[in-house]
Image: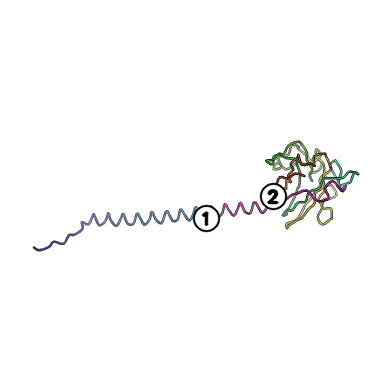
Amino acid sequence: MVGHTRSHHPKAVALIIAGTVAASCGSNADKRKDASTATAAATTAKSSANAASDAPAAKPATDSLKVDKVKSSDGPIETDGSNDGAISLSVDGPVRTLAVMTVDDSGKPTDNQQWDTTVGNKPLPKGFEAPFDTGESTWQLGVFEGGALKNAADGTVSLPAGHHDLVLYMSDSGYFTHEHHFRVFVERPDGTVVKSNVFTF
């Protein structure tokens, strides 16, 4: 018996090739999608890491309530004969405005206790979420670096780019205890605001 050789129908061959191409394209599309997802995840992680490293680090200073550096009012930095609360702050510049506020344990301002470098009728940065509107409504914040006063004559402050290890002084309002939480708010020249960790004394 003579054997017969089976031939493939042209349409069948075309369907097989089309299916193979489609599978290949699908596989490549999936690879591109996976690569895109991985890149996006990496970018998000990097942004989160940068945000974390950019956040100011704050804690009570060793000379808190032991020295007198500021007064309980707005304006030029002056002493008033009463010892002040003090905070050590590690922050990267540039810095245009600084504020310290009492907050709840989630970091939201509460209890209307605020010390800052905004003075007179100048508006407080909206990003601070402050309970007050202008600098004259709050107490002054003394800013020292390496023992030197960094506030300008009117009480405002401007720090250049680079790392800064500061000590912030605030007139005692009776809140520097373990029962109350604090946070430092930092405004950049472009208006963005970064916030420190929440801490207690």
Left or right: residue 134 versus residue 47 is right
Q: Secondary structure at mark 1?
A: helix
> Which quarter of the figure is the C terminus placed in?
top right
Residue 40 horizontal/vertical position (percent): 53, 53
Q: Which mark is residue 190?
A: 2
Magenta includes 45?
yes
Magenta includes 42?
yes
Where, by quadrant of the figure, is residue 110 drawn? top right
Q: Amino acid at mark 1?
A: Thr
Residue 127 horizontal/vertical position (percent): 69, 43
Q: Residue furthest bottom?
A: 2
Q: Is residue 194 above or below residue 111?
A: below
Q: Amino acid at mark 2?
A: Asp
Residue drawn at (41%, 57%) of the image: 28
What residue did someone put label 1 on?
39
Q: Is residue 77 above or below residue 104?
A: below
Q: How is the structure coloured here?
A: rainbow
Residue drawn at (65%, 52%) of the image: 52
Residue 175 horizontal/vertical position (percent): 80, 39
- Looking at marks 2 and 1 on the same chain, the residue that comes earlier in the sequence is marked by 1
Cα distance between the residues tagged 2 and 1: 29 Å
Q: Residue furthest left?
A: 1
Q: Secondary structure at mark 2?
A: loop
Left or right: residue 112 versus residue 30 is right
Q: Within 10 Å of the Cα at label 2, are there few (<14), some (14-19), or many (20+) other Cα atoms?
A: few
> Which quarter of the figure is the N terminus placed in?
bottom left
Left or right: residue 24 versus residue 180 is left
Q: Within 10 Å of the Cα at label 1, are there few (<14), some (14-19), or many (20+) other Cα atoms?
A: few
Residue drawn at (61%, 51%) of the image: 48
Q: Which residues are magenta?
A: 38-67
Q: Which mark is residue 146?
A: none
